Amino acid sequence: MIKFIPAEAVTSVRNIVLREGKMRPGQPHWPTDDLEGAFHLGYFVGDELACVASFHPESYADFTGTGYQLRGMATLETYRGKGFGNQLLNFGIVYLRGQKANYLWCNARKKALRFYESIGFEIISDEFDVPGIGPHHVMYLKIQ
Ligand SMILES: CC(C)(COP(=O)(O)OP(=O)(O)OC[C@H]1O[C@@H](n2cnc3c(N)ncnc32)[C@H](O)[C@@H]1OP(=O)(O)O)[C@@H](O)C(=O)NCCC(=O)NCCS
């Protein structure tokens, strides 16, 4: 089941999946999590949070219209490849369409490019390195 969840609720899955448990306990969530208009989604299997994604109002470069940045897309390892990430992201995209957003973008890890491409995102930057994390590309999805 997909639910809107508070920023504090996404940090456990984020920490396990995206920061390999390196965030200190009690470390605050990301500053952009609290931007006005930001929202967070969770995919629950029973009571367990299996997959999270965060959406922050943020334009990219000189793109026109209302842009959102997708951040913290993460599924716990046991739950990967079951379509949860796809469902969660598509839920967010439909919600953003209702909010009159024009596009969604993200800094996509190279390993996740195919996942985003299967949803309709396209690569719009050269490869760049995020120190300590690895190679990325900026990806873009037109919403409306
Ligand atoms: C990227 C990530 C979020 C995808 O989450 P997920 O819940 O596994 O996503 P899905 O199950 O919807 O899709 C994953 C793959 O499973 C496949 N899949 C989807 N439904 C499926 C099903 N019912 N049965 C089998 N495979 C399925 C998809 O085709 C997809 O393949 P692809 O990656 O080659 O496109 C997850 O792999 C992850 O957390 N990775 C580590 C962190 C990371 O890299 N995050 C992205 C940061 S930019």
Image (cartoon, rainbow, N blue to C red):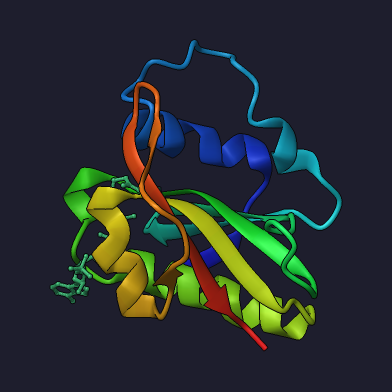
| Residue 56 horizontal/vertical position (percent) | 70, 53
| Residue 50 in sight | no
Taking the spot 68% from the left edge, 46% from the top edge, the residue there is 6
Residue situated in front as seen by the camera: 144 or 127: 127
| Residue 68 in sight | yes
Please state, as top left, top right, bottom left or bottom right, where the N terminus lies in the image: bottom left
| Residue 9 horizontal/vertical position (percent) | 58, 39
Which of the four quarters of the rendered structure image does ligand 1 lie in?
Answer: bottom left
Which residue is most to the top? 24
Instruction: Write down the quadrant of residue 100 in the picture.
Output: bottom right
Position of residue 119 in the picture relative to residue 57 (left or right):
left
Compared to residue 4, the image places residue 15 above or below, namely above
Taking the spot 65% from the left edge, 74% from the top edge, the residue there is 103
Instruction: Write down the quadrant of residue 38 in the picture.
Output: bottom right
Compared to residue 92, the image places residue 36 above or below, namely above
| Residue 116 horizontal/vertical position (percent) | 36, 67
Compared to residue 86, the image places residue 113 above or below, namely above
Taking the spot 46% from the left edge, 17% from the top edge, the residue there is 23
Residue situated in front as seen by the camera: 53 or 130: 130
Position of residue 24 in the picture relative to residue 34 (left or right):
left
Residue situated in front as seen by the camera: 83 or 1: 83
| Residue 121 horizontal/vertical position (percent) | 43, 74
Residue situated in front as seen by the camera: 103 or 40: 103
Instruction: Write down the quadrant of residue 70 in the picture.
Output: bottom right
Position of residue 47 in the picture relative to residue 75 (left or right):
right
Compared to residue 143, the image places residue 134 above or below, namely above
Please state, as top left, top right, bottom left or bottom right, where the C terminus lies in the image: bottom right
